[in-house]
Image: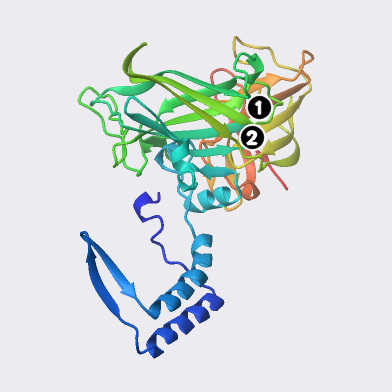
Amino acid sequence: MANKNTILSEEIELSEIVLEKTNQAFEMIKQEDIVYMKKTHTGGKEMFKVQAAVFAGVCILAVSSISAVAAIRHYWGRGMNGNIQASDEQQQELTEKNIAKVYSEEPDSPSHSVTNNGVTIEPDTVIVDERFVYMAFRISGYSVTDRMEPGFDMVNVYQGDNPENESAWLNISGTMYDGIVPDENGMPVYEDGTSIESYEDGSIISRYTDDNGNMEYIIQASAADRNDSLLGKTIHVEFKNLGVLSKASFIPAVVGDWNFEINLSDVSSTQNIKVGKKVEGTDFTMEDINISPISIKVNYSVSAAPVEKEDDLGIPEVKGAVLKDGTRIPYLTNPGRLGYTDSSKSNAYQIAGFVRVVDVNEIAALTVLLPYENEKAEIVEIPVSK
């Protein structure tokens, strides 16, 4: 995971044109007899005056800045990487394509923050596709004591401008980021890869704050209508009262409201892939998938719908993926939505977000969890060709 403090310290490769211009500028400096530097003191600050070298320096800055801008490193922050993990390359690609937005990089970044009673909250990173939006908000000015869990009294997320419209509300899951992420086998570890520590009573030691004492609240939200798209929408996020969660109760510490209006990107990152493969051992056929780097929608045809058992609809669930290089990602999807498209139960669907970013073009197969039979879980692979 990248270190935010060193994010811009990596070497920048200059093109041949930039190198040529830079060399010419330095040659001008060497040939100019009147070039000198004089150190002057101005109220405790240090300023270096450069005479003829100024022009050459401006040339260097002008030609070099092109490559410097192109080489900027986007950093999603610890909260977003706890929400959906991504490699450095994936962070750069999705941000450059405007699928992800890092608010701290924006010129008007301070205008997005809201301060109330000494606590400042601001959006950090937002990632969106048609089905899901992942959001991370940074919180400064408040922390909790050991063994206490921070949280809000209420968090509301809706689209559009009318919160009274039921169709505007989103399905959300949100929590204060505790520094714990799943490893490649789905086992919990700290974000730096180290094993989970625990207190003497066995309870887990959470790491809510970063090195600067800030916390992050992470949200995953999806539209209530499975056919609705979030692309290009305006999302309202409302936080009310900050404090501590204790068992089933909330203990307020800072009373206030922090409200945000988030304009989502309209850039689509999804691919529609025809599959047409029967799910072995079931009456379901995976007809096609609509998949992005952060979520999936699976469409099934059903020859005979199974008997429902309480809340179990008997619909197969995509759980992971196999990449073309043989890499297996057994735990890729979050618990999502399963259902039939109509009362005839001749077609079914699954919608799920991912716990890590994937390169869709590198997926060779999907791993599918079959409906439980005799309490035994069985996984099958469905090849995916593009």
Quick check: 194 above or below 236?
Answer: below
Residue closest to the eye, 142 or 249: 142
**Residue at the spot 20% in from the left edge and 59% down from the top edge:** 44
Quick check: 307 above or below 228?
Answer: above
Q: Quadrant of residue 249?
A: top left
User: Label 2 amino acid?
Assistant: Ile
Residue closest to the eye, 284 or 343: 343
Q: Which residue is mark 1?
A: 350
* Relative to 77, 159 lies left or right: right
- The residue carrying pointer 1 sits among few (fewer than 14), some (14 to 19) or many (20 or more) residues within 10 Å by Cα, namely many
Disc 2 from disc 1: Cα separation:
8 Å
Which sits earlier in the primary sequence, circle 2 or circle 1?
2
Q: Position of residue 259 (x, y in %)?
A: 48, 25
Circles 2 and 1 in contact, beta carbons < 8 Å: yes
Residue closest to the eye, 10 or 104: 104
Residue closest to the eye, 194 or 207: 207
Q: Which residue is mark 2?
A: 296
Q: Position of residue 320 (x, y in %)?
A: 57, 37
User: Label 1 amino acid?
Assistant: Gln
Secondary structure at numbered mark 1 = strand
**Residue at the spot 22% in from the left edge and 22% down from the top edge:** 201
- The residue carrying pointer 2 sits among few (fewer than 14), some (14 to 19) or many (20 or more) residues within 10 Å by Cα, namely many
Inspect this view and state whether residue 318 appears. no
Q: Position of residue 171 (x, y in %)?
A: 57, 21
Secondary structure at numbered mark 2 = strand
Q: Quadrant of residue 82?
A: top left
Which residue is outermost to the front?
42
Q: Position of residue 292 (x, y in %)?
A: 64, 41
